[in-house]
Amino acid sequence: MYLDGLLGDTESVMTVLEEKEYDRLAKDEKELLQQLWIEHGSYEQYLEKEELAVSRLTEYMTNQNLPDELDRLQNILNRSDPHIDFAKGVLSKEWDNVLANREGIDLTEDRKTHIVTAFLSIEDVAAAKAFVGEKAPKNDGLMNRVLTAEKNQVEMATLEDEKVGLQQTIDDSEDKGKVTEAKEKMVVVQSELDALKRIMDCEV
């Protein structure tokens, strides 16, 4: 039976599995059937059999960038669901929507990453750090990402302060030498700021 699936006839495999009693299927058969339901868009069957179907479906749709399928799932459910709203927020990069729905979802590793991205996108490094510390303390990758963002934020603030001081010298000083030096330094500081902003945008 599963050879058909390997040869591309996944619909036949799905039909054979559906004919069996779902609760009597082996774990790997259930997982295969669930995957086939997702791939074939048979969301109603999946929702009927599995409590975590909405969570898994929305994560799949997020990873595959399928906003229209999220709308279809919303219509099938005929109710609001934080998993759907969260996924739509991720795909549209509406970070406030992502953060507003973070408490009502199953926290998978992918979703933790999206939440950190949301916090960093609105420049709330402290909240991102607190979230990782509470929800993903063993995820060194996420914590390193947050610590890098924190370091960049401090460096950005230092450069901005330096820029303000240089501008004040340019505006107020009567010493032409100091003004010329400040203008030259301003070019360097601005270049460093622009480079840092590009780095920060890429890291988000």
Image: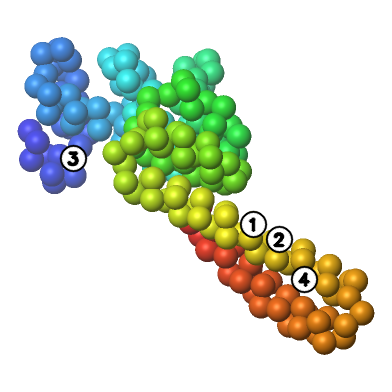
Label 4: how many Cα within 10 Å (few below 14, some 14–19, many 20+): many
Q: Position of residue 133 (x, y in %)?
A: 39, 35
Please state the horizontal and vertical placement of residue 134, each as a whole percent of the image.
39, 30
Q: Which residue is mark 3?
A: 9
147 versus 36 height, above or below: below
* Left or right: where 48 falls relative to 122: left
Which circle's residue, 1 or 3, is located before the other in the chain?
3
Q: Secondary structure at mark 3?
A: loop
Q: Are marks 3 and 4 in contact (CB under 8 Å)?
A: no
Q: State yes or no: discs 1 and 3 in contact (Cβ < 8 Å).
A: no
Image side of residue 24 versus residue 60, left or right? left
Numbered tag placed on residue 157 in the rendering: 1
Q: In the rendered image, which residue does mark 4 sit on? A: 166
**Crowdedness of circle 3 by 10 Å Cα count: few (<14), some, many (20+)?**
few
Q: Dot 2, crowdedness within 10 Å: few (<14), some or many (≥20)?
A: few
Nearer to the camera, 8 or 115:
115
Label 2's element? helix
For the residues labelled 2 and 3, the Cα–Cα distance comes to 64 Å
Q: Is residue 142 left or right of residue 25?
A: right
Q: Which residue is mark 2?
A: 161
